[in-house]
Amino acid sequence: MTMSSADTHCPYCALRCAMTVTHAGDATVTGRDFPTNRGGLCAKGWTSAELLASPHRLRMPLMRRSDGTLAETTWDDALDAVAAAFRETKATHGSDANAIFGGGGLTNEKAYQLGKFARVALGTSRIDYNGRFCMSSAAAASNRAFGMDRGLPFPVTDLDAASTILLFGSNVAATMPPFLAHLAGARAAGGLIVVDPRRSATARLTEDGAGTHLQAAPGTDLPLLLGLTHIALAEGLADRAYIDERTTGFDAVRRSVAPWWPERTASTTGVPVPELRATVRRLAAGRAYILTGRGVEQHVDGTATATAAINLALVLGLVGRAGSGYGTLTGQGNGQGGREHGQKADQLPGYRSIRDPDARRHVAGVWGISPDELPDAGIPATALLGELGGPVKTLLVAGSNVVVSAPDVETVRAGLKALDTLIVCDFFLSETAELADIVLPVLQWAEEEGTMTSLEGRVIRRRQALPGPDGARSELWIMSEIARRLGAASTWSTDPAEVFDELARASEGGIADYSGLSHALLDTGVEAYWPYRSESTPRPFARRFAHADGRARLVPVDATPPTPTDRGGDLTLVTGRYLQQYQSGTQTRRVTELNGARPEARLEIHPATASRLGIREGALVAVSNERGTVRARASVTLDIRHDTVFLPFHYAGDECANRLTEALVDPTSAMPEFKRTRVRVAPDAAVSVAAVGHGPVVVSEHPAVGRTASPSSRVSEIAEEMHV
Ligand SMILES: Nc1nc2c(c(=O)[nH]1)N[C@H]1C(S)=C(S)[C@@H](COP(=O)(O)OP(=O)(O)OC[C@H]3O[C@@H](n4cnc5c(=O)[nH]c(N)nc54)[C@H](O)[C@@H]3O)O[C@H]1N2
Ligand SMILES: Nc1nc2c(c(=O)[nH]1)N[C@H]1C(S)=C(S)[C@@H](COP(=O)(O)OP(=O)(O)OC[C@H]3O[C@@H](n4cnc5c(=O)[nH]c(N)nc54)[C@H](O)[C@@H]3O)O[C@H]1N2
Ligand code: SF4
Ligand SMILES: [Mo]
């Protein structure tokens, strides 16, 4: 075996840590110097190569047989069946009965091609993606305020010189460990302020004089932000010159925060008045950043809350100024690029609106079709999942494991089962792929070329270090083959560099303009922050915002949340992440070291609450509401509030947190409420150790070709393997 190596980036999160993959029989990774990670990687990055050679990889297409099992088949047969399903669905039920569900982990090229495939090859409006679960509220708020949504409108390294960083609902110590280096300056200055209902790993970094943990009640971020803005105005800390010169809408925002005097804010949020005042004074003292994460965004009022965070930053004059700023921490590997190039229901490439006649004309021109042939805007992810088995009959999923990660998963599972045809592209048999009629095996990150866009809006290259396994194919090839079988218009290149060139043309003149970029240029190592026509734009708001008048909009929001459906119980469940598991766990539950460290979901519960309910450390508990029950072991900890419990969402089956969450969405962004669910918790003596301790993880690891995978059969097989 000859040795090959490539400079690329980690497969997982949006920090896009740089690594070199070396292939000499086995693939290995080493950290590579890059501004976001400076050579560092987290445990997920270090262990990422294990999955390239995983015995559980899919190596042949699978098709469901009449006996209900999945069996290997040829590519020709699988692709013929996919094309037939799309064709028959369209003929019988119309174009919108075919649907696509994409993902923020796909390269720019694949995300672009998927959006084009939906609109041109299928003629459907029904396309959306998991970024709706992730970025949509912050994106909606940024678009409205700034005329543009680039998660961080400045390079990550700008944070290094900050003296104050307010982290709202983000646990970077677990979700982007190398990012902590960029918090070091603020910590040294005593200015790391973390808002989280849990004493998370990141909240603990505020201890010993490094900053402050504001342990607000879950879902009270909006009143908290209104209260902070109230204090800024009342104490004369607002930057009036900046407000006059760079914003509009100030008076309405001033009126909207008037009712949130400090004592009321403190009693609503649980954060004491002196901490509220100290927070605002620090932010107003300069060199300050406000950053939001999923903890504040994944709520029914997520857009309003992100807007309130932006308002606070604008009132203090922090945005678009050297040495200060506002941003949101994008999560998925290509969460940023994934939302720019057309896999979102209402978007065309270049962050263009599919409702804008000029945008339609431009993109249709690049695609060689008439603008009239482009479908209208589709519907957001949660609504799309709600149509499965109803108006939507055939669904292709590429880059998401919805049956673990979507809200109210048992309803999603029923929808997937009610489809005529479910097609899943993945490199593992994810829980969603287990339900598919046709599974198409694809390449992993180190086996393909492409580009990704980091959380700071920087376009970077993904490079191939080794060939994929025989039998797996690139998604560009898969789309071209299906398009050909459907007799689709336009051209369907399988070469990522060519697809990128087309994407660059389609994006030209759009908000996310990539028109000056190419693989060849990126290969020179050029620093490429979008918009990039002829040069990089690291700080797009330095002189003006992206609205026509160059000003940012201050938009008043109020803290009357939509009527909650608090029927489920007396505790609030918040959900989130472990360092060692990624998302729905398809990948990390298959990495020995990572799964060994975090083999199961643990319910975090306060000692007083646990003792009231008769729950001991390590005891099996049932967490339930009207949608379902999750079984997990209890972790009794002082790190959480009395009224709150926590579960990670990385696990399937009985441990799947999304059995409990509700498909309730933010009215502006359609982001689901993942972070605040009413539940009851009770000791659960009825559950066997095997069923809870290891869930369905072990069995779904097997390349389970030809086996049905019902939860009950899985549990008994696990029991056998565990010898219990
Ligand atoms: N290890 C690991 N890293 C990841 C991922 C992963 O799955 N695993 N996923 C990646 C992706 S896609 C994303 S989007 C990012 C997410 O990164 P983060 O935003 O850091 O992730 P979460 O754990 O979902 O939420 C952060 C914190 O919000 C808190 N929280 C919950 N409810 C509230 C609330 O009402 N208010 C406030 N202020 N806080 C609240 C939780 O307690 C949690 O500590 O991580 C990325 N990185
Ligand atoms: N309760 C709760 N639920 C949540 C969240 C939460 O905080 N709480 N967070 C939400 C967030 S922020 C997110 S981003 C979602 C994420 O949840 P998912 O959308 O389920 O994300 P992943 O687990 O990353 O799923 C990606 C799937 O695609 C596969 N895959 C990876 N790369 C590729 C590729 O290039 N091509 C193809 N075809 N497949 C690929 C992986 O193997 C995996 O099966 O979960 C959301 N769900
Ligand atoms: S922080 Fe994110 S990009 Fe960096 S090594 Fe970890 S998972 Fe990979
Ligand atoms: Mo995410």
Image (cartoon, rainbow, N blue to C red):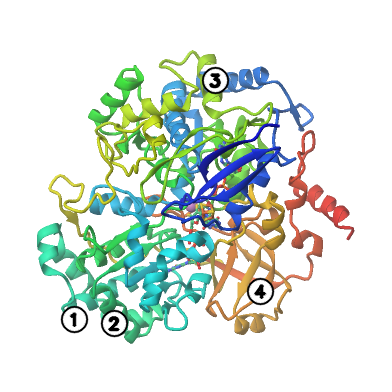
The kind of residue tagged 3 is Ile
Q: Position of residue 470 (x, y in %)?
A: 69, 27
The residue wearing badge 1 is 235
Residue 116 found in image quarter:
top left
Instruction: Name which residue lies at 50% across and 55% down.
Output: 39
- Label 1 to label 4: alpha-carbon separation: 43 Å
Q: Position of residue 515 (x, y in %)?
A: 30, 31
User: Is residue 305 shown left or right of residue 2?
Assistant: left
516 above or below 190? above
The kind of residue tagged 4 is Ser
Disc 1: CA contacts within 10 A as few (<14), some (14-19) or many (>=20) = few
- Label 2 to label 1: alpha-carbon separation: 9 Å
Q: Nearer the viewer, residue 624 or 110?
A: 110
Labels 2 and 4: the sequence-earlier one: 2
Instruction: Name which residue lies at 37% across and 85% down.
Output: 272
The kind of residue tagged 2 is Arg
Disc 4: CA contacts within 10 A as few (<14), some (14-19) or many (>=20) = many
The residue wearing badge 4 is 635
Disc 2: CA contacts within 10 A as few (<14), some (14-19) or many (>=20) = some
Quadrant occupied by the C terminus: bottom right
The residue wearing badge 3 is 482
